[in-house]
Each structure stands twice: as structure tokens, then as C-alpha cells.
Amino acid sequence: MSFESKNLTEADGSHLYNDAVTLRHQLIDSLADLNPDMMEHVINSASYDDIPADVIKRALHSVTVQNQAVPVLLGSALKNCAIQPLLDAVVDYLPNPKKNNNEFTFQSDQICAFAFKTVHEPERGAVTFMRIYSGELKKSASLYNATQEYSEKIGNLYTILGDQLMETKTITAGINIYSKHILQ
């Protein structure tokens, strides 16, 4: 299945188009209050319609990284609706794990990861989605779970490529992974 992006025009429905333009203007107003570069673009532009999308994206990234705002996106994985824009937003707006991130302080050779979702699948058992900030995670390694205060042994590691799971023996920083874990 492929994803196609197209610009919304008045031909798609004037009510829908007018709502989108109004919401875009509100977004620009809100970003201008939080981001000096966006404020400069607003002052120097004849109209909000003249402000390019890449300027808005840069401003959204900046306010998100500085914890001034949180972008909210809607979609449905079940219906495969708006998943690609959500993944693009993760790349566009969230901090790059390879850049210095003041939220986490760690040695670059040690593993530092954030498990953001665990689900139970009938065919795989407990499955954890993780983002690795530094280090390298190997199959059958033990990790200390700081939240639960115990060690976990990692079972199989997978990288996600679309809806395919590719088994791998090691995962490095910056890759979102899918791992089956075995509790000790």
C-alpha cells in the first residue's frame, strides 16, 4: 500500500478548504507567540498564505523540542488511516536521538533506551516497542528496567519495515525496534 499526499483545494469542498485555511492561520498565530523565527516571518509576510510549509515545520520542531508545545495527530492503525503522516511527524518534530539531548545523560557506549509501548500478541507473547538513545542492544542481553526496578532478558529483536518484521541480532541508537522480551 502506498501513501499519496496532495494539496487541498477549494474544488475538494469549499467548507473543508475554508476550515483548513482557518486552522492553518490559527497554528501560525500560536507558533508566532512561541517562536521568534516564526514571528519574524509573520511580520515580514503580506499574508499568512505566503508563509511556506517548511517554515511552519521548523517552528513546530523548535517548540516541540523546547517543550513549549505538543503536536497532536489523529489516525487509525486499524484502518491504516493517517499512519504515514504520523511517522513523518515523529521524524520532523521530535528530537533526533543522535544529537545531544539534555533530557538524558548517559555514557555514549552504554545502552539507554525508552520502552514506550508493550502489547501482548497471541503468536509472539509480550512485545515491547523501544527507542534506543545510545549504545547497542544485542539479542539475549539483560536490561535493567528502571521503572519496575528489575532486569529483563531480551529475546528476539526485530526492526520494522512497513508491516514486515525483520529479525536482527543487534540494534543501534536511533532505531525504533520491536522486541520480544522474557522477564527474569
Image: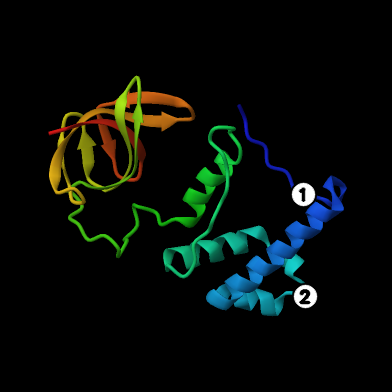
What's the residue type where badge 2 is placed?
A: Ala
Label 1 neighbour load within 10 Å: few <14, some 14-19, many 20+ = few
Q: Nearer the viewer, residue 140 or 146?
A: 146
In the image, residue 167 above or below residue 37? above
Q: How many marks?
A: 2
Res. 173 in view: yes
Corner quadrant of residue 159? top left
Q: In this view, does 78 lie to the left or right of 159?
A: right
Judged by depth in the image, the label closer to the viewer, 1 or 2, is: 1
Which residue in the structure is indicated by mark 1? 8
Q: Which of 41 and 146 is in front in this view?
A: 146
Tell me what residue is drawn at x 51 percent, y 44 percent: 87
Secondary structure beneath dot 2 equals loop
What's the residue type where badge 1 is placed?
A: Leu
Q: Position of residue 160 (x, y in %)?
A: 41, 31
Please give the label number shown on residue 46: 2
Gap in angstroms between the C-alphas marked 1 and 2: 22 Å
Tell me what residue is drawn at x 61 percent, y 64 percent: 55
Corner quadrant of residue 95? bottom left
Please give the label number shown on residue 68: none
Q: Is residue 24 left or right of residue 139?
A: right
